[in-house]
Amino acid sequence: MKHLLLSLLLVFSSVSAQESKVGTIDIDYILSLMPELSGVQEQVQAYQSELSDGYTEKLNLYEKALQDYRANESLMTLMQKKSKEDSLLVMQNELGQYQQNGNQLLALRQEEFMQPLYTKVGQSLERVAEAGGYTQVLLRDNNVVYIDNRFDLTLAVLKDLGIEVPKEEE
């Protein structure tokens, strides 16, 4: 009875393994060849420049306030010095917070600009995977131990998107 059960288990596992087809894809490579990427990069750079201008403006105000403090320090009372130093400390903290928030906003905006490209690649991947009968597709990165290039869908997705692959890459 045990042998029969074990035999059935092996048969079912081999049948289910035959039904499963796994492929891989290199999304970063596909994105790097998409002509729309240069537009996204320009948008990100424009937004980064906008954030940088805001930071520079705040930095100039801080430096001006610091110079003013140093120039008039000898004329100030202890209370005035303490008040001005507290004000400068607040400005300095705001600069650090502005820079940190700017980095987070930049990352969010970049993701927002990239979303249509990810959607386009995802839709193409769905068409290619369905046409090829793939049940699973893994990202081709350093986490995959072995990849048989016959099951890499990257070139098929590029073809589906109408993107020409440089000759040395094929």
Image (cartoon, helix red, strand yellow):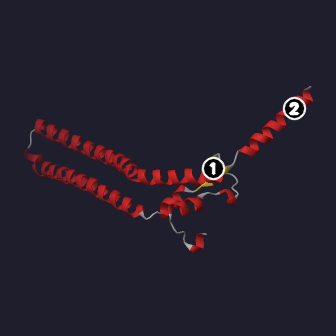
Foreground: disc 1 or disc 2: 2
Residue placed at 88% from the left, 34% from the top? 7
Q: Report crowding for label 1: few under 14, some 14 to 19, many 20 or more residues within 10 A (C-alpha).
A: few
Element type where label 1 sits in the image: loop
Residue annotated with mark 2:
6
Q: Is residue 36 left or right of residue 23?
A: left
x then y, percent, for residue 163: 50, 65
Spatial distance from mark 1 to mark 2, Cα to Cα? Answer: 33 Å
Element type where label 2 sits in the image: helix
Residue 82 falls in image quadrant: top left
Amino acid bearing label 1? Asn
Q: Residue furthest top?
A: 1
On residue 143, the disc is 1
Amino acid bearing label 2? Leu
On residue 89, the disc is none
Q: Report crowding for label 2: few under 14, some 14 to 19, many 20 or more residues within 10 A (C-alpha).
A: few
Q: Is residue 157 left or right of residue 6?
A: left
Q: Residue furthest bottom?
A: 167
Residue placed at 44% from the left, 55% from the top? 117
Quarter placement of the N terminus: top right
Viewer-closest of 28 and 92 = 28
Sequence order check, earlier mark of 1 and 2:
2
Q: Is residue 15 left or right of residue 87?
A: right
Quarter placement of the C terminus: bottom right
x then y, percent, for residue 123: 51, 51
Q: Is residue 104 left or right of residue 13?
A: left
Q: Residue furthest front?
A: 131
Viewer-closest of 82 and 125 = 125
